[in-house]
Amino acid sequence: MNRQELVANIRSKKSFLCIGLDTDLKKIPGHLLSEEDPIFAFNRAIIDATAPYCVAFKPNLAFYEAAGVKGLMAFEKTVKYLKQNYPDQFIIADAKRGDIGNTSAMYARTFFEEMDVDAVTVAPYMGEDSVTPFLGYRGKWVILLALTSNKGSLDFQLTEDKDGERLFEKVIRKSQEWGSDENLMYVVGATRGELFRDIRRVAPKAFLLVPGIGAQGGSLEDACKYGMTEDCGLLVNSSRAIIYADQTENFATVAAAKAKEVAGQMEMFIHNI
């Protein structure tokens, strides 16, 4: 999916909501455990219920890998289900890959050729040759970790060099030599508030994937106030607050209501786009 298609879908739905499919067998409603594939059954129900209110889904690979081969099969079935039934949805594999060039090339082949997702999250620590193999696929995206919402991000991401440039700023500035706003996004945690202004000084037009809304307490208002661009430029993710809002047989209906509520809040910020 290219940028124009993504922006068109955002404008059409008046939403920039991304729903994280962090599917944990220990957290899904108990009645699903009798299904042949509980993970996929849960995902399918969530997708069907919430697709009208979001523009992207983000399966987190850790939750599928933890279930072994069956989990990876459920991930693959989920991607295929989205592509067949909701082709307008932007599919992000939240895999946080990144290794030496030939290894990254295999990761890129896995997600962009075999799995055929639209985007994959990538760790930038190993530099250019660990990232560029992912950037060689037309219509595919790298979502580079830049400024995350976890406590440990303070260990490295906000450290400054002798010129006062912080590491997250260096990552964003340098990576723009490898890709463009047409194939490169950045992860910026919603809990970072006014730091979105600093992000926009370095990357004024790039799309940002913004986790941390909902269960992590991030502010949608701050993300929009400081991070929104003329064509939105944001994909704001919510996972647990939507998909685990209910544990009964009505879980999908409740998830839909939660997604609709967030999308309604987003519409207030997006009316001029």
Image (cartoon, rainbow, N blue to C red):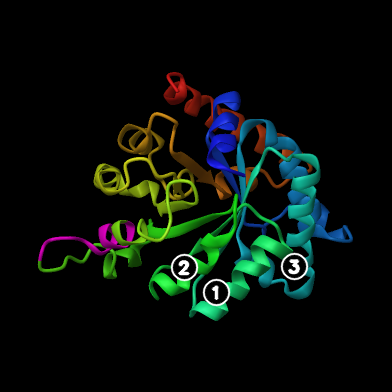
Q: Amino acid at mark 1?
A: Ser
Comes first in the chain, label 2 or label 3 = 3
Residue 19 lies, with reference to residue 267, above or below; the image says below
Q: Position of residue 41 (x, y in %)?
A: 81, 52
- Give the CA separation, mark 3 to mark 1: 22 Å
Q: Which residue is at 74% across, 39% downward?
A: 86
Q: Nearer the viewer, residue 36 or 79?
A: 79
Q: In the image, what residue type sits under mark 2? A: Val
For residue 131, the mark is 2
- Circle 1 residues within 10 Å: few <14, some 14–19, many ≥20: many
Q: Secondary structure at mark 3?
A: helix
Provide residue 155's location: percent of width, then percent of height: 28, 70
- Mark number, residue 104: 1
**C-beta proximity under 8 Å, tags 2 and 3:** no
Q: Are marks 2 and 1 in contact (CB under 8 Å)?
A: yes
Q: Is residue 148 above or below residue 17?
A: below
**Main secondary structure of the magenta stretch:** helix
The label nearer to you, 3 versus 1, is 1
Q: Report the front residue among 16 and 37.
A: 16
Residue pushed farthest top? 272
Q: Which residues are magenta?
A: 163-172
Residue contact between numbered discs 3 and 1, judged by CB atoms under 8 Å: no
Which structural element holds mark 2? helix
Left or right of 272? Residue 142 is right
Q: Magenta segment: does it hold 75?
A: no
| Residue neighbourhood size for the residue with mark 2, other residues' Cα within 10 Å, grouped as few (<14), some (14–19), many (≥20) | many
Q: Amino acid at mark 3?
A: Gly
Residue at image x 40%, y 45%? 206
